[in-house]
Amino acid sequence: MRLASKLYDWLASGSAPQCDQILAAALTHAEPEYFDRIVRHLLERGHEASWAGLIENFEGLSPGVRTQLLARPELVQSGFTRALRASAAEARRNALTVFAMQPCPRLAHLLAEALLDKSSAVQNAAARALRQTAEVYLAEAAPLSARAVIARRAEDAPERRELARALREVVRTFEVHHRVELVEVALWFARDIGEYLWAALTTLRSPLGRVVADHLAAWDNPRLATFLLQALARPEWRRQASQQLLGWSGQTELVALLHNSDMLDDAEVCRGLMFVRHPEWFDGLDANLSHLPRDLRLHVPRWICCLGFDSAGRLSRLARWQRATDPELSRAALYALATLKTPEARARVEAAAGETSAEVSPDATFARWYDTGRSAGLVRGTGQRQREPPSSPHLAAEAAGVGLFDAVFGALWKVCQTGPAAEAEAALKIVRDNATFWYGRLAAALRSRVPRERILAVQVVNTSGLARHFEEELEFLRDDPVEAIARLARTLLRSEVHGRDDERRPAPLVGDFPLAAVPLTSTGTGATVDRAALGEAAGDLRAVLQRLEDGDSNAAAFAELAECLRDCRRALGMESLEPDTHVQGSAEGMR
């Protein structure tokens, strides 16, 4: 035994990595006296192979040694990676036990691989570790304001990306491992997994679809907010999702939904929300929504417009919040009232336009511009003038209530998508220079499921001045599956101008009302609307739009269109959203 003792001392003093490997291998067969001695040598050496050997024998370590082991997270992570490749199933199971005690989302993809291990004990340990990793990650994220969520998403993008990668693999291999508890976790990350998840849930009768349909009610949890909203956009899932959302009533559930307010830009989600009739989410909230985080409460009026309330229910809630002492909440409620088509809602907007005080409020300015735009036929659904039957699709859309600015955007967007390179570049520049009119349309395009839409939209906001107004949308494009989009989004978010905190982001548009951002982008809250100039500019704009629809998309037509839009802005006292300078790339480079 003295020779064995000398051998261990010699190995402990050696500098070669093989010394750690030999000592670690000896642990499995060592007698108690030598086991403790080898453990001491491995702790003292502090190498990756040392920690791998200790992790492989974790179950036999004393509490004190375990504490010392876990005190070195960097060695735990590298040692885990090595131990998970061990030939002995018991060593792999021990490695996963250690991982669950100290989760590392960046290594989550290794857990997905371990789910397919030939040892059932290892599979069970891998499932527990993956679920624990997701739960710890999400627990650290709550409760956060909307801006804090965005900042954390940017900071932890690699970790979240690896978690999503692991859960995507869970979805892909479900019919091999059948881990139902991990399907629930995958639903928590529905936004990150994206369409890959819904491809597996095409119907309620697919293998994964049956599991979700059978367990969804039992899994009820605020972490399902994103999944349930996405489910509303899919007819086959709409009924079950709407029923589950109707059962929500607590503030925790409401906050989880409000963190997903960007999804209201998806027309299919809004269509699905109409099936959530008279939810109790807002019952018991005071007139200032003071129990909600400040940056989330401003989204509440828009939710009221999308949910399945009747006209009286919408009006009573919005009217209450319009009287809030919080000016931003009051303004958001007024924007929402402007989208309602009832005489009572219109009367409230007109009453706001008639307010008089020593200092003209932004609400009154907005209401006056709204009234002017409605009279001029510029606002969706409020055109008053009788015209000859339109001779083009976009003018037909305008006559049906789409609105002149929406019609112009549609024509320009079509040229951007299908026109020759030179014409597309010219059309895209007009959209960029007049982004004030189309803030909501651009925000929706940045979140579109269609890659081509996202490519065009990110090109429009590809300037140092515009990028700051689309911070949330660009954050979601950081990890876009189209690498060109993801790369440009990350560049815009890193740009120096976009990083300033002194710029105020315009309030999000409510519904499809194109002038809702005006009060925050105008030359002043007391700006005067030149009604005569606005009417003349709108008439010229319609004439140029007709030419574009007739196929006259030459340089002269684009120049006239740009001038008409400038005239409209001047008549309304509006500024642009400051396109400034390009940060990177061009429209042609991503066509």
Image: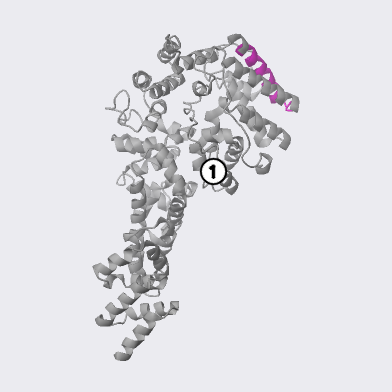
Q: Nearer the viewer, residue 264 or 329?
A: 329
Q: Nearer the viewer, residue 72 or 560?
A: 72
Where residue 238 appears, x then y in whole percent?
Answer: 40, 38
**Type of the residue with mark 1:** Arg
Q: Nearer the viewer, residue 406 or 331?
A: 331
Q: Residues within 10 Å of mark 1 (few under 14, many from 20)?
A: few
Where residue 514 appears, x then y in whole percent?
Answer: 53, 23
Q: Which quadrant holds residue 151? A: top left
Where residue 41 appears, x then y in whole percent?
Answer: 33, 77
Q: Decide whether the magenta segment is chiefly helix, strand or loop.
A: helix
Secondary structure beneath label 1:
helix
The furthest residue to the front: 13
Where residue 417 appears, x then y in whole percent?
Answer: 65, 36
Q: Split into 4 quadrants, where in the image is the N terminus?
A: bottom left
Answer above or below: position of 551 versus 353. below
Residue under the point 44% across and 15% down: 361
Q: Which quadrant holds residue 281? A: top left
Give the mark count. Answer: 1
Answer above or below: position of 325 versus 487. above
Q: Is residue 341 visible?
A: no
Residue under the point 41% across and 46% down: 204
Q: Which quadrant holds residue 87? A: bottom left
Q: Is residue 560 visible?
A: yes
Q: Nearer the viewer, residue 453 or 579?
A: 579
Range of magenta residues: 534-554
Residue designated by label 1: 494
- Magenta includes 536? yes
